[in-house]
Amino acid sequence: MTYKINHKFKRLKIWLVVGVAIALLSISLSTIFTSPTPVIAKATPEKKEVRGVWITNVSSSVLFAPWAINRALRQLSLLNFNTVYPVTWNRGNTFYPSDVAKRVIGQPQDQTLTTFRLGQDVLREIFKQSHRQGLRVIPWFEYGFMAPINSLLVKRHPHWVTTSLDKNRNFSEGFFELELKDLLPESDEQSLLTQLQQSLSIYNVWLNPIHPQVQNFIQDLILEVVKKYDVDGIQIDDRFGMPVQFGYDPVTVHLYREQHQGKMPPEDFTDPEWMQWRANQITAFMERLYKSIKAIKPNCIVSVSSNPYDFAYKLYLQDWQTWIERGLVDEFILQVYRNDLPSFVEELEQPAVKNAKNKIPFSIGILTGTMKTLMKIEKVQQQVKAVRDRNFAGVSFFYWETLWSYMTPDSPQERRFEFKKMFPTAVSRPRLGSVGR
């Protein structure tokens, strides 16, 4: 019996060898008789494009159920996205088990996340599943220095909060009475006023980005993530700054007087020199943070997502144009959350944008909708086309829940179909240090 089996295996091996030989011979003969002259395929550079999406806990449940986040990452991969920006810091809480947060705040991560996920490390699971699906992960430090007034962080460290001239640490309602046309281009007034009003809520305060202890805390959080996880990068956003009416707290005033021969800061918070001085302090911290990240992981992408420059600087003292000029940013995503195409395109044509996109990979953030603002897929397609026509590095969408779900104006199936048409094949991201695509 054994002999018969061995004999059969020998015959099978012989026929396999003969079959392979015939197949190779057929290919060779076919090449000889059908291609009298060699055909050399033209080498085409690989297209590179950022195709990202922000994953947040605000008006979204995707982080709180194991099946939800895994399903989301799988869908993104199947539709040829290549980057996710998961929330890591928001509303005074981390969204990963943090030793820094436990020491400074008193709890290691957001309590809702701990309850729903039984204390699991959701961020580690996102890294594991994303890298398995071919997605890059850039943890997103959403909300920057803004925190709820009733958060444990603010209750434990009230001296970290900056104030206005009248010593009010809450956002002043009187700020809305400012003539926005004096601070912003006319095209931005209506589209950004809603966003400003939502941010400048009496329920939020602002950690002082110039306070040494606040800087150490934020840097420790970011470096903890860089060390602890297999990060592709980290991202800070539009709240990584200071509202222009703030900065009259004792720490900031003392530092200003030290550098101005005892002179007090101007009472006019829009005074150009006072604005620039505060912006410079934030830039100095950005430089320190950038160097610290690179000292740990040189290839870690330092990504910034922010608003158009006039808005970012004049209202939040965030001088991202200088950050890019000084080489402190590896990737930039401009948040252009507009409902109509003309105002969207107008932002893409701004001189600051054109200048910056020639220096680093510069992408555009597109709004796919919110709970109150529904965006039809046709508008999303038009904006993606406008970005591609101008040779930006890619797009990122705010936010996951509104890409395709039952809260969108089009059916989930229709929207997934249209995204597949926008991203028909998989592509890689622009390399660190490259410009454009």
Image: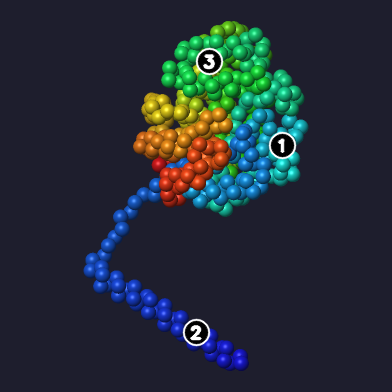
Relative to residue 47, is residue 271 drawn left or right? right
Element carrying mark 2? helix
Instruction: Give amino acid for label 3.
Output: Met
**Image quadrant occupied by the C terminus:** top left
Label whose residue precedes the other's in the sequence (1 or 2)? 2
**Would you name the residue on which mark 2 appears?**
12
Circles 2 and 3: CB atoms closer than 8 Å: no
Relative to residue 45, is residue 254 drawn left or right? right
Residue 83 visible in rendering: no
Is disc 3 surrounded by few (<14), some (14 to 19) or many (20+) residues within 10 Å? many
Q: Residue 374: x, y in percent? A: 51, 32
Residue 23 visible in rendering: yes
Element carrying mark 3? helix
Relative to residue 154, is residue 344 drawn left or right? left
Label whose residue precedes the other's in the sequence (2 or 3)? 2
Element carrying mark 1? helix
Q: Distance between the residues labelled 1 and 3?
A: 38 Å
Q: Which residue is drawn at 66% across and 29% down?
A: 91
Q: Quadrant of residue 93?
A: top right
Q: Which residue is drawn at 54% across and 90% down?
A: 7
Instruction: Give amino acid for label 2.
Output: Leu
Which dot, 2 or 3, sits closer to the camera?
Answer: 2
Nearer to me, 435 or 147: 147
**Would you name the residue on which mark 1 appears?**
112
Instruction: Check the image and report above or below for 134 versus 380.
Output: below
Label whose residue precedes the other's in the sequence (1 or 3)? 1
Q: Which residue is drawn at 61% across and 49% down?
A: 70
Residue 275, numbered label: 3
Instruction: Give amino acid for label 1.
Output: Thr
**Image quadrant occupied by the N terminus:** bottom right
Q: Residue 252: x, y in percent? A: 63, 16
